[in-house]
């Protein structure tokens, strides 16, 4: 009880922190610094309106962008509000209409409005002043999580109480004795994980490090479970994660009913959505006609006979709604939704023998409890050594809100965990370090990828060291080469003496006004290093073999800087679609043939800040299939034992290159 009560208090702390941050952002001073950021677009232009497939009123707005938007809080279905500056320019005034994002792409937002009167008011306001759009706080999620924690604390249901106490750690998990499960196309550890999932009476965990086939294993575990049960609930913390596993289950031949806001679903999953299935039900045309008749009769004073007729229509309407709803759930073998979506009104009073939570290591514990209330047992799938859930309040994170329920079970009940130990993504030398540091050396590379390289003369690991020759000499380290790599000239550099002089003033890391850090010289070095690598392999081969590249930096400012530098280079035009640049979070769940990581930090004190989140670095490293290039200052980084060990791994297994001046 104390654990759940503490979670509730920490969640309240997070909610208050987010509300306070939102209130602070209502100052006019913040607009100049945050316009066209992830949560704020200002000013916007009203472009027109219409209706979407669900007959909802949609307003399209546009705004200026440099095509370099890294993050986005305007996800489909997310609440948003219009605002303008007060007449004296000292405050932000929000319009009293809550909108919802229908679709988003850089430079264009489509927003679902509540009604025509709100549209008229917004249009009228736009005639007199500039309007902006802000992402609003989603209080619904907080409400669902608080209610779930209270329900979990006070439940008297015998089955749930047993599951709750097992997850918290007060009771030992139970397992049935079952013969081995053998799915021919899966490896030994995957089959063992499925066996444990099926045998578990309370909880099991499928721990899937990068490239080990976690989703494939979960899909087969769900399929195997459905040989013994009629229906399962499948959840994940995000709509994207729900859609991904739902698509795989649908391809496996399972009938998936996707619950949630259609605005938040992928195009592929719309056909499986509750709303689309509802509209496709054979009884829906009759229901639609009844609803139309009742709408037309509203507001009138019907005769006694007409009243009786309308009463019969309402009764028939209710019968049809109940029948269609029951049919949709009875026909589905998999019901899928987000963790918060499990509290959706049509899920009320529904219960499942088994709940599967995918990407559980990214899920807040209070959100998990919302879904667990609907199940007799729970199966977690994920990797607690990769990205954690997002917690904005530092104090709440430090006190435990960032610790997931999956982490807690892994720590307290290791007998529930099945580690998938064979990865099918990385060269073994790339895999070796994260395996040793994060997975107790238990990962192994499948034979088909263990020695796979892009070029026979290439090494899978290269560290481009930006420690200057002067600093190497002072520390008695390698050689006496000078400086970081310069800007060069012509197509490969800035071509301007003035610009080169400016770059010398900006050596090392620099913090921008919103707190993100960049390193100009290192960004230029990233662009030059990637070009050198493409030259070595051969541009024609890169194009013909569709070799893809990922450039990762933990810092948004550095990502923006690298993107701009790449756009300046004609050399990259032929392979522009093969090069992606993003933060670590942007590459979660993805992989590339070649990964280049810009570490950014360069200071005498060994301050590494955000790089101290080692799980993010695990994600960055393990995106690479055949080549991993790290560009960074070994002296700064090696003051942290993780990066010291990583640098030594590159020394032993790969190639070290000192950044040279041109």
Image (cartoon, rainbow, N blue to C red):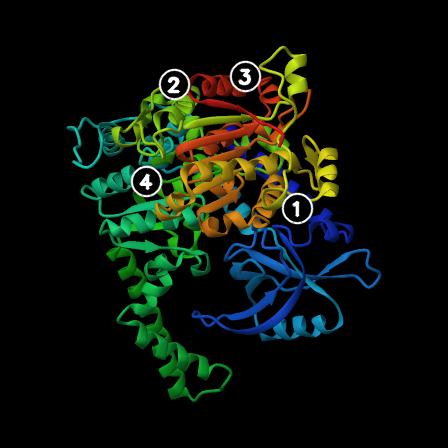
| Image spot of residue 406 (x, y percent) | 42, 31
Q: Please tell me whether residue 30 is drawn above or below residue 657 in the rendered image.
A: below
Task: Please tell me which residue is depicted at 58% across the width and 60% down the height of the picture.
Answer: 107
Identify the disc placed on residue 440: 2
Specify which label sits upstream in the sequence, 4 or 1.
1
Identify the disc placed on residue 641: 3
Q: Residue furthest right?
A: 88
- For marks 1 and 2, give the one nearer the viewer: 2
Mark 4 highlights which residue?
215
Q: Residue furthest top?
A: 476
Specify which label sits upstream in the sequence, 3 or 2.
2
Task: Please tell me which residue is depicted at 24% across the width and 51% down the height of the picture.
Answer: 254
- For marks 4 and 3, give the one nearer the viewer: 3
Q: Quadrant of the C terminus?
A: top right
- For marks 3 and 1, give the one nearer the viewer: 3
- Whole-Å distance between the Cαs marked 1 and 2? 41 Å
Of 523 and 141, nearer the camera is 523
Specify which label sits upstream in the sequence, 3 or 1.
1
Q: Please tell me whether residue 266 is drawn above or below residue 298 in the rendered image.
A: above
- For marks 4 and 1, give the one nearer the viewer: 4
Residue 331 found in image quarter? bottom left
Q: Is residue 228 left or right of residue 169?
A: left
- Label 2 CA crowd tier, 10 Å (few <14, some 14–19, many 20+): few
Identify the disc placed on residue 591: none
Q: Is residue 110 left or right of residue 411?
A: right
Identify the disc placed on residue 19: 1
């Amino acid at each position: 009880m104390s654990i759940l009560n503490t979670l509730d208090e920490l969640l309240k702390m997070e909610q208050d922190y987010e509300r306070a941050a939102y209130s602070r952002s209502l100052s006019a001073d913040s607009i100049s610094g945050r316009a066209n950021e992830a949560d704020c677009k200002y000013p916007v232009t009203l472009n027109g309106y219409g209706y979407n497939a669900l007959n909802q009123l949609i307003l399209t707005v546009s705004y200026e962008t440099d095509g370099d938007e890294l993050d986005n809080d305007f996800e489909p279905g997310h609440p948003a509000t219009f605002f303008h500056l007060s007449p004296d320019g000292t405050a932000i005034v929000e319009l009293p209409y809550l909108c919802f994002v229908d679709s988003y792409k850089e430079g264009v937002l489509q927003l679902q409005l509540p009604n025509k009167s709100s549209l008229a008011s917004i249009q009228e306001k736009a005639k007199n002043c500039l309007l902006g759009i802000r992402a609003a706080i989603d209080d619904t999620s907080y409400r669902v999580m608080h209610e779930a924690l209270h329900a979990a604390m006070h439940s008297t249901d015998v089955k749930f109480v047993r599951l709750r106490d097992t997850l918290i750690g007060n009771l030992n998990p139970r397992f049935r004795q079952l013969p081995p499960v053998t799915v021919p196309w899966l490896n030994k550890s995957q089959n063992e994980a499925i066996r444990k999932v099926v045998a578990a009476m309370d909880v099991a965990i499928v721990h899937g490090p990068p490239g080990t086939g976690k989703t494939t294993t979960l899909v087969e575990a769900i399929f195997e479970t459905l040989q013994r049960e009629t229906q399962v609930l499948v959840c994940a913390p995000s709509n994207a994660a729900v859609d991904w596993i739902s698509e795989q289950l649908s391809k496996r031949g399972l009938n998936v009913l996707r619950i949630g806001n259609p605005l938040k679903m992928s195009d592929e999953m719309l056909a499986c959505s509750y709303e689309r299935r509802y509209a496709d039900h054979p009884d829906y045309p009759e229901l639609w006609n009844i609803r139309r008749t009742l709408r037309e009769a509203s507001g009138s004073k019907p005769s006694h006979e007409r009243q009786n007729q309308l009463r019969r229509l309402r009764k028939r309407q209710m019968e049809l709604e109940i029948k269609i709803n029951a049919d949709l759930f009875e026909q589905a073998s998999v019901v899928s939704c987000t963790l918060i979506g499990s509290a959706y009104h049509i899920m009320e009073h529904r219960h499942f023998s088994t709940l599967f939570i995918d990407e559980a290591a990214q899920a807040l514990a209070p959100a998990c409890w919302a879904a667990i209330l609907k199940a007799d047992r729970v199966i977690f799938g994920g990797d607690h050594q990769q990205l954690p859930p997002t917690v904005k309040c530092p104090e709440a994170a430090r006190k435990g809100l960032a610790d997931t329920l999956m982490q807690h079970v892994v720590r307290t009940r290791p007998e529930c965990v099945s580690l998938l130990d064979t990865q099918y993504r990385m060269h073994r030398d790339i895999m070796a370090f994260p395996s040793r540091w994060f997975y107790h050396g238990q990962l192994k590379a499948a034979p088909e990828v263990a020695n796979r390289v892009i070029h026979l003369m290439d090494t899978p690991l290269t560290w481009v060291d930006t420690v200057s020759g002067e600093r190497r000499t002072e520390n008695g380290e390698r050689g006496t080469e000078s400086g970081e790599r310069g800007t060069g000239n012509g197509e490969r550099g800035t071509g301007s003496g003035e610009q080169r002089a400016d770059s010398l003033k900006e050596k090392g890391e620099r913090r921008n006004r919103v707190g993100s850090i960049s390193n100009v010289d290192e960004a230029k070095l990233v662009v030059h290093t990637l070009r050198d690598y493409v030259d070595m392999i051969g541009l024609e081969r890169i194009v013909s073999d569709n070799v893809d590249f990922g450039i990762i930096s933990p810092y948004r400012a550095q990502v923006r800087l690298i993107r701009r530098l790449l756009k300046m280079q004609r050399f990259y035009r032929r392979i522009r679609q093969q090069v992606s640049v993003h933060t670590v979070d942007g590459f979660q769940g993805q992989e590339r043939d070649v990964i280049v990581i810009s570490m950014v930090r360069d200071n005498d004190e060994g301050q590494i800040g955000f790089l101290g989140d080692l799980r993010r670095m695990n994600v960055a490293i393990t995106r690479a299939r055949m080549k991993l290039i790290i560009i960074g200052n070994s002296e700064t980084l090696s003051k942290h034992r993780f990066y010291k060990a990583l640098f030594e791994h590159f020394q032993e297994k790969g190639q070290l290159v000192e950044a040279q001046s041109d």
